[in-house]
Image: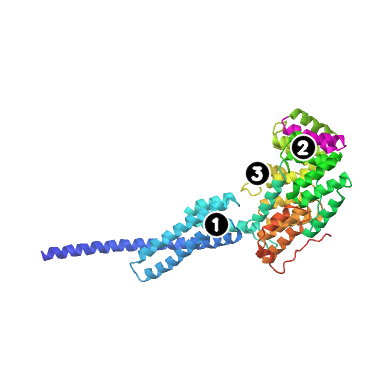
Amino acid sequence: MAFGVLNSVTGNTAFLAAAGNNFSAAVDIMFYINLALIFCALIETTAFAVLCKKTSCAVVAGLVSVLLFVFGLIVFIVQLVLYSYGHRGTVYAVYMCLAFLACGFIAGGVYCCILSRNSHAALCYFTCAFQLVPPVGAALAVLLSYRIGKDTRVQEMVFNGYAYTYAALGSFCQKNSAVFADNSGEEYFEPLSVKQIKRKLKSLKARSTLSAENMYEYASALINYRPYKYKKALRAMERAAEKNYSPALFNLGYYYERGLYEKKDYKKARDYYVKAVASGDDDAALRLGIIALEKGEAQDGMRVLDERAAKGDLCAKFDIGICYERGLGVAADMDRALDIYTECAQAGLFAAQKRIFALASTDINSAQNGEFFRKVTDRKFDGGFADMIDGLICIKKRLAADASEKFLSAILKRDKWEGVARCLVGTLYIDCGKLPQDKKNGAEYIKSAFDMLPSAHEIYSVVPRSILKIRGGKSDEPQAD
């Protein structure tokens, strides 16, 4: 019996020894697997850290991946110590290390997937997919960080997102939507202090009873400087209109047509425009055609536009392009609209240039170049507008420094695009400035556009106070040769 028990114990010991040997071999294999994964994780940690520094997109996901890899490395060091002493706790460290690394690769895949919405979509998707094959995934992560690095070379700039630039472009698009234009233009009102505005309005009010022109000037200044007193301004405008002053008649018609300060009323707008035409205002006749189009009277509206376009009226031709874009009176055809806008823009019509720029800006932040964007950027233009389009192409390619060069070139042209160019140079420096002084310079550029671009005030108002308080940030104003 004793002999049988001895044999049984000996057999169990042999089995346990064999199992221990197998277990030890499994731990050895897992140890070397973790060692290989740690090598890949260190490469990806470096790549993701670079990406997080260069882009503001999904930084949290990138940092989570980096932290998981760091925890994995710490557990691997613990595992290494335990393994060297043959401690049985090694197995727990092995599995913990493997779990941290696996979670790190998953988080890295999520990070790359989110990053694809803003830069190098195909490469980001490949990097995400090959996180399942760490050596390949690590190589692709390095390539991705290198590609974004190449996108943002020179001029002390790095890509960290284009939040302010996109906001500026979005504001431009909103203010230059597909609306009809005429030759009346916009009145310029210089920016004044509160005291200066008060003195100016007091002076204009004192003279407002002298003539219809003085009444009109007072009403226009009141609407611009004290828009909350629009009812008082409209009464003054109506008094000027009663004396058949054509600018007042035209403006009242425009207010009713567009629903500005008063409820939209096409009948009243038409009445004022008819009186303005009788007083010798040519633009009022064009607005009558536009109203006909808006009310579905396509035949009458297109007849007016065609007649004026045949006489060389660029605004009428531009409005025909609006009809093709919006499908008013004709079948919608963006290619035809773009052809008309291009013809008008090349002839120097600023409204057409602004519409083309707005159309090109609409998908500037999309992951892929749209077909329409390419059609816009393939057109040939002159002057500051050509620089503005080239700047958009650079932004689309994430070439911040090159974009700023193009916009600086547009500033030197000193044409109608100077204000927009100054604003975009400013936002690029705020978004992509490497040094605090770069961001301060950007704020100064936006501020310098106040007199040229009303929306510059809106953009400047959201610049963080911390940037405005930075010392030593003088704007490096470009000098004309």
Q: How is the image coloured?
A: rainbow
Give the crowd class for mark 1: few <14, some 14-19, many >=20 residues within 10 Å.
many
Q: Nearer the viewer, mark 2 or mark 3?
A: 2
What residue is at 61 percent from the left and 56 percent from the top? 147
C-alpha distance separating marks 3 and 1: 26 Å
60 or 243: which is nearer to us?
243
Disc 2: which residue: 319
Distance between mark 1 and mark 2 Cα atoms: 50 Å
Q: Amino acid at mark 1?
A: Ala
Classify 10 Å Cα crowding around label 3: few (below 14), some (14-19), many (20 and above).
few
2 or 3: tag closer to the N-terminus: 2
Residue 193 seen: no
- x, y percentage for residue 375? 71, 42
Which residue reaches farthest right? Answer: 210
For the record, the magenta segment spans 270-296
Residue 286 or residue 220, whichever sits in front = 220
Instruction: Name the residue type under label 2.
Output: Asp
Residue 404 bears which disc, if any?
none
Mark 2 element type: helix
- Name, please, the residue furthest toward the top: 299
Q: CA distance from mark 2 to mark 3?
A: 25 Å
Q: State the residue position of label 1.
A: 141
Residue type at mark 3? Gly
Residue at 86%, 34% in the rendered image? 278
